[in-house]
Amino acid sequence: MNVLRRLVALALLAITLMFSAREARAQTTDLAARVAARGPRDLVDSALPAGSLTVPPLPLDHVTERHGPLTISYPRALKPVVENALRRAEGDARAVAAQFGMREIPPLAVRLVADPEMMRRLAPRELPPPAYAVGVAYASARLALVSASAPRTWAASNMAQVLRHELSHLLLAEATNHADTPRWLSEGIAVHQADEHTFERFQELASASWTGRLAPLRRLDEGFSEGTDEVNVAYAESTDFVGYLLRIDGATRFSILIDHLRDRMPFEEALEQTYGASMARIEEEWRRDLDGRVAFAPLWAGTGLLSIGGAVLVVAALLRRRMKNRATLARWESEDTARRNRWMFLTRPALRLVPQPVDASTDLPVEAPANDVMLPVRRAPDDLPRISHDGAEHTLH
């Protein structure tokens, strides 16, 4: 009997473990599917609740240091490579937080690793880093990882700069209370805060503009995929649009947008409340601004040599832009005219036609009330002067 009970217990335990493992795999698969639907990028879990990820333990050869609110771990042998990043980390974190209007920085964990493969091993296994990433941020875990070498090329990365980029992702999530912000906004802000502006990125933007590969802002998040070309264009476009917002009204206005997002205002509504125009209108104005800055791109993009084909493209683009600008200005003027007409209709006082009274003694008009229209005085025929000539009377008028 005891043997039978043990067999039954073992069978039940095996069934329980089997279903538990299957449920865990299903949850992991569902989590991966949710992230895949959002598209991989270096900020991979902005919409996940805290505690959703399992962070692997550090290897024994890793050293851990405290730098203010940052806990930074790295392989002991990598110390000469990470020294600059260690020296700058706390100051960069505080500078980024100040730009978001944050007075305090929560505890953040940073892992500096030798290569993308080690970054993948030390990242949460539910959400591995994108294949193209040299750094990755997990906002729900308050964790950032940075590799000393780039994937595919194995070229040395600027670890201090990449770390500042990833800290921007983490601190933006904290500043907005983990609001559901567009990915392109987070990436554009991070590029600006890490000062990752390059001529190659502007070349990519100019080429995408000329070839019609720029995506509408509402679809720009789809560009952060594994395809290198799409990722490069998405980064270039998001960076330039965020830069345009910072140019037109400065960082103070941009901080108001962050406040609206923290108050859980939907992004497009927050953008309109901050800048006084819809996202579609702002995007249209940004594209006109971009057209002006990349108008002569065919003369230097690629080889940088002046060519007849490039000159023809420039002329054609200038003509096309001029026609587009005229159509846009005409439409805006029509909208403004209609808006003014509606305002005047609602606010203009009514006019009344009032006969002009006549003073019999002075024959002068008497003042009418305000907003009344004075009508001319017509004399009665009997009041007109008369003369006699050749036996007939004539009136003078």
Image (tube, helix red, strand yellow):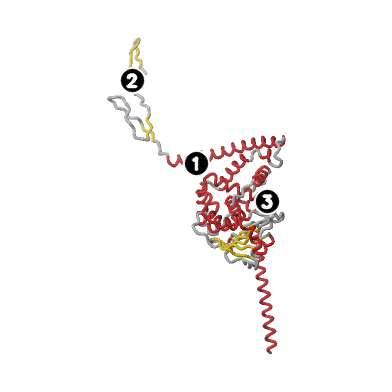
Q: Residue at x 60, y 47 (%)?
A: 240
Q: Nearer the viewer, mark 1 or mark 2?
A: 1
Amino acid type at circle 1 is: Arg
Residue pointed to by mark 2: 384
Q: Residue at x 53, y 54 (%)?
A: 95
Closest to the observer, 234 or 7: 234
Count residues near mark 1 (Cα–Cα under 10 Å), then give few for <14, some for 14-19, many for 20+.
few
The picture places residue 163, in percent across and down from the top left corner, at 60, 56
Instruction: Give the farthest residue toward the front.
Output: 80
Count residues near mark 2 (Cα–Cα under 10 Å), then give few for <14, some for 14-19, many for 20+.
few
Residue pointed to by mark 3: 230
Amino acid type at circle 2 is: Leu
Residue pointed to by mark 1: 339
Q: Are marks 1 and 2 in contact (CB under 8 Å)?
A: no
The picture places residue 172, in percent across and down from the top left corner, at 55, 56
Quadrant placement of the C terminus: top left
